Image (tube, helix red, strand yellow):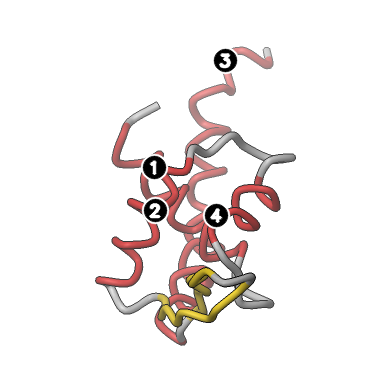
Amino acid sequence: MDNQLKRGLLDVCVLAAIKNEDSYGYRIIKDMKPYLELSESTLYTILKRLEAANMLTVRSIEHEGRLRKYYHITPLGLSRIAEFKADWEEILSIYRFITKEEEA
Protein backbone atom coordinates (compact mmCIF):
# COMPACT_ATOMS: atom_id res chain seq x y z
CA MET A 1 0.00 0.00 0.00
CA ASP A 2 1.19 3.50 -0.75
CA ASN A 3 2.80 4.94 2.38
CA GLN A 4 1.02 8.28 2.13
CA LEU A 5 -2.35 6.62 1.71
CA LYS A 6 -1.68 4.27 4.62
CA ARG A 7 -0.55 7.19 6.80
CA GLY A 8 -3.77 9.06 6.07
CA LEU A 9 -5.88 6.01 6.85
CA LEU A 10 -4.07 5.39 10.14
CA ASP A 11 -4.51 9.03 11.14
CA VAL A 12 -8.27 8.75 10.66
CA CYS A 13 -8.35 5.42 12.51
CA VAL A 14 -6.65 6.97 15.54
CA LEU A 15 -9.04 9.94 15.45
CA ALA A 16 -11.98 7.52 15.28
CA ALA A 17 -10.61 5.62 18.28
CA ILE A 18 -10.88 8.75 20.45
CA LYS A 19 -13.95 10.25 18.78
CA ASN A 20 -16.41 9.31 21.52
CA GLU A 21 -14.15 9.26 24.55
CA ASP A 22 -10.73 10.57 25.56
CA SER A 23 -8.18 7.80 25.63
CA TYR A 24 -4.52 6.95 26.22
CA GLY A 25 -1.96 5.10 24.12
CA TYR A 26 -2.28 1.55 25.41
CA ARG A 27 -6.08 1.67 25.25
CA ILE A 28 -6.05 3.10 21.73
CA ILE A 29 -3.88 0.18 20.59
CA LYS A 30 -6.15 -2.29 22.40
CA ASP A 31 -9.32 -0.75 20.90
CA MET A 32 -7.86 -0.87 17.39
CA LYS A 33 -6.41 -4.40 17.69
CA PRO A 34 -9.49 -6.24 16.33
CA TYR A 35 -9.20 -4.15 13.15
CA LEU A 36 -5.47 -3.58 12.61
CA GLU A 37 -2.08 -4.06 14.20
CA LEU A 38 -0.42 -0.86 15.32
CA SER A 39 2.89 -0.66 17.17
CA GLU A 40 3.44 1.77 20.02
CA SER A 41 6.12 3.63 18.07
CA THR A 42 3.78 4.08 15.10
CA LEU A 43 0.91 5.19 17.33
CA TYR A 44 2.95 7.80 19.17
CA THR A 45 4.26 9.18 15.87
CA ILE A 46 0.67 9.51 14.66
CA LEU A 47 -0.47 11.12 17.93
CA LYS A 48 2.33 13.71 17.74
CA ARG A 49 1.45 14.47 14.10
CA LEU A 50 -2.25 14.87 14.94
CA GLU A 51 -1.45 17.10 17.90
CA ALA A 52 0.79 19.29 15.72
CA ALA A 53 -2.08 19.54 13.21
CA ASN A 54 -4.48 20.63 16.01
CA MET A 55 -6.68 17.57 15.48
CA LEU A 56 -6.29 16.47 19.08
CA THR A 57 -5.18 17.84 22.41
CA VAL A 58 -3.25 16.14 25.18
CA ARG A 59 -3.53 16.34 28.94
CA SER A 60 -1.55 14.44 31.54
CA ILE A 61 -3.24 12.83 34.53
CA GLU A 62 -1.58 10.92 37.33
CA HIS A 63 -2.54 7.26 37.31
CA GLU A 64 -1.07 4.82 39.83
CA GLY A 65 1.83 7.15 40.55
CA ARG A 66 2.67 7.79 36.90
CA LEU A 67 1.60 10.43 34.43
CA ARG A 68 -0.69 9.12 31.71
CA LYS A 69 -1.37 11.20 28.60
CA TYR A 70 -5.00 11.37 27.55
CA TYR A 71 -5.89 12.40 24.02
CA HIS A 72 -8.98 14.41 23.13
CA ILE A 73 -10.28 14.98 19.60
CA THR A 74 -10.80 18.60 18.52
CA PRO A 75 -13.40 20.00 16.11
CA LEU A 76 -10.70 19.93 13.42
CA GLY A 77 -10.19 16.21 14.12
CA LEU A 78 -13.93 15.59 13.86
CA SER A 79 -13.91 17.48 10.55
CA ARG A 80 -11.13 15.21 9.29
CA ILE A 81 -13.26 12.14 10.05
CA ALA A 82 -16.21 13.73 8.19
CA GLU A 83 -13.95 14.51 5.21
CA PHE A 84 -12.75 10.92 5.18
CA LYS A 85 -16.31 9.61 5.12
CA ALA A 86 -17.13 11.89 2.17
CA ASP A 87 -13.93 10.87 0.34
CA TRP A 88 -14.65 7.20 0.97
CA GLU A 89 -17.44 7.14 -1.63
CA GLU A 90 -14.98 8.35 -4.26
CA ILE A 91 -12.41 5.77 -3.15
CA LEU A 92 -15.02 3.01 -3.47
CA SER A 93 -15.93 4.22 -6.94
CA ILE A 94 -12.27 4.08 -7.98
CA TYR A 95 -11.96 0.60 -6.47
CA ARG A 96 -15.01 -0.59 -8.41
CA PHE A 97 -13.50 0.80 -11.63
CA ILE A 98 -10.17 -0.93 -11.02
CA THR A 99 -11.75 -4.29 -10.19
CA LYS A 100 -14.61 -4.28 -12.72
CA GLU A 101 -12.75 -6.51 -15.18
CA GLU A 102 -12.19 -9.11 -12.47
CA GLU A 103 -15.93 -9.42 -11.91
CA ALA A 104 -16.73 -10.26 -15.54
The span from disc 3 to disc 4 (Cα, nearest Å) is 30 Å
Residue lying at the far right of the rendered structure: 34
Q: Nearer the viewer, residue 83 or 96?
A: 83
Q: Type of residue at label 4?
A: Cys
The span from disc 2 to disc 4 (Cα, nearest Å) is 13 Å
At 38% from the left and 75% from the top, the residue drawn is: 55
Callout in the foreground (3, 4): 4
Secondary structure beneath label 4: helix
- Please state, as top left, top right, bottom left or bottom right, where the C terminus lies in the image: top right
Disc 3 designates what residue? 101
Q: Residues within 10 Å of mark 1 (few under 14, many from 20)?
A: few
- Quarter of the image holding residue 65? bottom right
- Asked if 75 appears above or below 77 in the picture, the reply is below
Disc 2 designates what residue? 44
- Asked if 76 appears above or below 39 in the picture, the reply is below
Disc 4 designates what residue? 13
At 29% from the left and 61% from the top, the residue drawn is: 49
Secondary structure beneath label 1: helix
At 49% from the left and 58% from the top, the residue drawn is: 12
Disc 1 designates what residue? 41
Mark found first going from the N terminus, 2 or 4: 4
